Amino acid sequence: MYVFYCSNSIEPEQMASGISKLDGVTVKTISLPCSGKIDVPYLVKAFETGADGAVIVTCKQNECQHLEGNLRANKRAEAVESLLEEIGMGKGRMAVIMLKEGGVEQALGEIRDFLDKVRNLPQSKSSATHV
């Protein structure tokens, strides 16, 4: 599992601390200067290296320091979701989580829910052990 997140909204220590509480799951976190900086090839690479799921955590609505970065992130996630379906991995392996008033804790709760969802999807052809 990969978690890409906006470093303008979440401190790396906060994310690392929260992710460390997800027992039994290997999660690679990648800090971005803006969630809108994520690009399709980078997301695809996560799946090529064995990830069964990827999450992009964006800043709160209307609070992006780069105007529409969270909207760009969402569009790119949708493009990758379509590619995954096209190659036979199915839908449901990409998620975009927008921060809300609950902050990091709210995002971590949604990441946990997404992990449960991904665990129940058919295993990807690239890896039967990675999440």
Image (spheres, grey):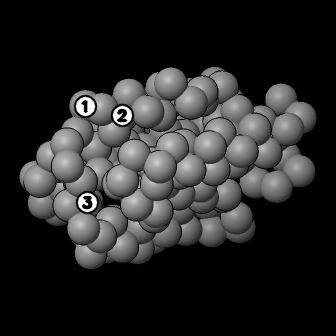
- Under mark 1, the amino acid is Thr
- Tell which circle, 2 or 3, labels the residue nearer the N-terminal end: 3
Is 113 located above or below residue 90 in the figure? below
What percent of the width, then of the height, locates residue 13?
A: 41, 38
Residue located 53% across and 51% down the image: 81
The spot of residue 78 in percent (x, y) is 63, 50
Q: Secondary structure at mark 2?
A: helix
> How far from the left and from the top, in percent, is residue 80?
54, 43
Q: Which residue is mark 3?
A: 21
- Position of residue 39 measured from the top left corner of the image (x, y, whole percent): 60, 27
Which labelled disc corresponds to residue 68? Answer: none
The residue pinned by badge 1 equals 49
In the rendered image, the vertical position of residue 9 relative to residue 31, given as above or below: below
Query: Within 10 angstroms of label 3, few (less than 14), some, or many (20 or more) residues?
Result: few
Q: CA distance from mark 2 to mark 3?
A: 22 Å
Q: Distance of mark 3 from mark 1, alpha carbons?
A: 23 Å
